[in-house]
Image (tube, rainbow, N blue to C red):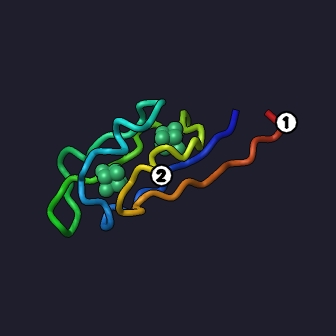
Amino acid sequence: MSRGRAEIDRERCKGCTLCIGACPEKILAMSRDSFNRQGVPYAECFDESRCTACMSCAIICPDMAIRIIRLVTIGGE
Ligand code: SF4
Ligand code: SF4
């Protein structure tokens, strides 16, 4: 299975929460006590080890705030 890491640009995030529902692994959540410079909570990945690099979050984000880094796994899995 592919592995990845979601890099979320908090300053581009407008807090719409679309990516939260789009992630099949349910590993994205809105920040609770932190806000970006626009004053809104932003999306965060709280368990990168479960990211499959499926791209769903990046595709649905209307602000192109998410970039997926695909990780290479040794062993060809
Ligand atoms: S790439 Fe897929 S699994 Fe990873 S955070 Fe985005 S929606 Fe979730
Ligand atoms: S879809 Fe984009 S703008 Fe909306 S909460 Fe997620 S990262 Fe932020």
**Mark 1: is the Cβ under 8 angstroms from ligand 1?**
no
Q: Residue furthest right?
A: 75
Label annotation for residue 21:
none
* Horizontal and vertical percent position of residue 37: 20, 69
Residue shown at the point (55%, 36%) measured from the top left? 49
Q: Quadrant of the C terminus?
A: top right
The answer to which quarter of the image holds residue 68 is bottom right
Q: Are marks 2 and 1 in contact (CB under 8 Å)?
A: no
Please state which of the two labelled residues, at mark 2 or mark 1, is closer to the viewer.
Answer: 2
Residue 64 drawn above or below residue 73: below
Residue shown at the point (39%, 54%) measured from the top left? 61
Local packing at callout 1 (Cα closer than 10 Å; few below 14, some 14-19, many 20+) is: few
Q: Is residue 10 left or right of residue 16?
A: right
* Horizontal and vertical percent position of residue 21: 35, 35
**Local secondary structure at mark 2:** helix
- The first of marks 2 and 1 along the sequence is 2
Identify which amino acid the numbered label 1 is placed on.
Answer: Gly
**Local secondary structure at mark 1:** loop
Residue annotated with mark 2: 59
* Horizontal and vertical percent position of residue 58: 47, 52
* Horizontal and vertical percent position of residue 59: 48, 51
Q: Residue furthest left?
A: 39
Residue shown at the point (57%, 41%) measured from the top left? 54
Could you tell me how far apart the alpha carbons at marks 2 and 1 are, in whole angstroms? 28 Å
Residue annotated with mark 1: 75
Residue shown at the point (28%, 45%) measured from the top left? 17
Q: Quadrant of the N terminus?
A: top right
Q: Is residue 4 left or right of residue 34?
A: right
